[in-house]
Amino acid sequence: MLAGDDHKSLRSIIFNFLNGERLRTAFLDDAEQVMSLLMSSWKDGSLISAKNEAIKFSFYVMIKEILNVDPGEPEMHKLMREYNELIKGIAAIPLNLPGTSYWKALKSREKILKIFERKMEEREKNGDENPRILERDDLLNWLMKNTAYGLEEIGDTLLQTLFGGHDTTSRAISLMVYFLDDCPRAVQQLREEHLHIVKKKRRERESKLRWDDFKAMEFTKYYVIPHGCTVITHFLAVHLDPNLLRILLHFDPWRWMGSSDIKMKNFMPFGGGPRLCPGAELSRMEMMVFLHHLLLNYSWELAEPDHPISLPFVDFPKGLPVKVHPLSYK
């Protein structure tokens, strides 16, 4: 975990890169395009791994914003393969011997950083001949223009941003699919909310999601903490206080609706204070885009029993296999 000046520096970079206009336009459009690409392979009765689809969705979006690499490019597949190997070794015993998970993770990290470095060198070499290369609106160009970082520092920043912006979001999407499968009432209320947005857009002769649509998804977002709140809390325990919630381990999205003081001060999924996640709005946007297109285009059910575990990260032993069925709304 980063601390001190390193943490402040990374937060400053992410906050500046994720400025409102970029998030409301490029990021949102790219997320929709990636989701449409994934859904193009989902046929009636298809058996898919919701965990893997969530991983691909979030990873594709983040690599697009970091390096401007599209899902179909060979570098995307190589980056995903090496990143998955890296994740396996993050919590492994730090035994740097050939064949161990830790050793494999270090090798994968080297390969990822080499791809980043090659991209930087290509842009530095070709930027004078083709200035448009340096106009790409991705994090790599932003770092090259706005910091004095060298190759190693930029590579580390890109990798840290990828980890922070992809890993937790993909796992949250998997959990979202898992819990909603067992709560048809919530699915129905969500679908009604998203259908209302689509019908409104049709009347206005629009098709793409806009930031105003994202902000209008009130039930989808649960509760938004008002600006100006200052809360210091133990994040791991805040959702497990029996004095605040009736049934602690039951999926109940309605518990966060309304504006009571108890709910306002005890729903902090993205932390708070100096540790507030700088990518909170990006994560929310990705989850809502995924859910928006899933709700409006498919129904789904678990193909076989599966459940989340945490060893050390949230995972599904069977990959959360689900069957999807296309829906049609006039």
Image (cartoon, grey):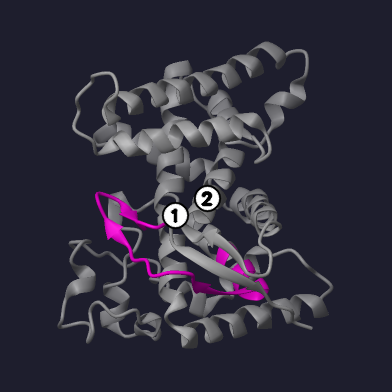
Q: Position of residue 221 (x, y in %)?
A: 48, 72
Q: How many residues crowd around disc 1 within 10 Å: few (fewer than 14), some, or many (20 or more)? A: many
Q: Is residue 296 magenta?
A: yes
Q: Position of residue 28 (x, y in %)?
A: 64, 55
Number of the label disc, if any, that sits on residue 208: none
Residue 234 seen by the camera: yes
Name the residue that disc number 2 marks: 58
Do the CB atoms of the residues marked 1 and 2 lie less than 8 Å apart? yes
In percent of the image, x 51 and y 62: which residue is there?
A: 287
Q: Amino acid at mark 2?
A: Ser
**Nearer to us in this view, 38 or 211:** 38
Above or below, 144 relative to 290: above
Tell me: 195 left or right of 242.
Answer: right
Magenta range is 290-318
- Real-space CA distance between mark 1 and mark 2, rounded to the nearest whole angstrom: 7 Å
Number of the label disc, if any, that sits on residue 169: 1
Secondary structure under tag 1 reads helix
Q: Is residue 63 magenta?
A: no
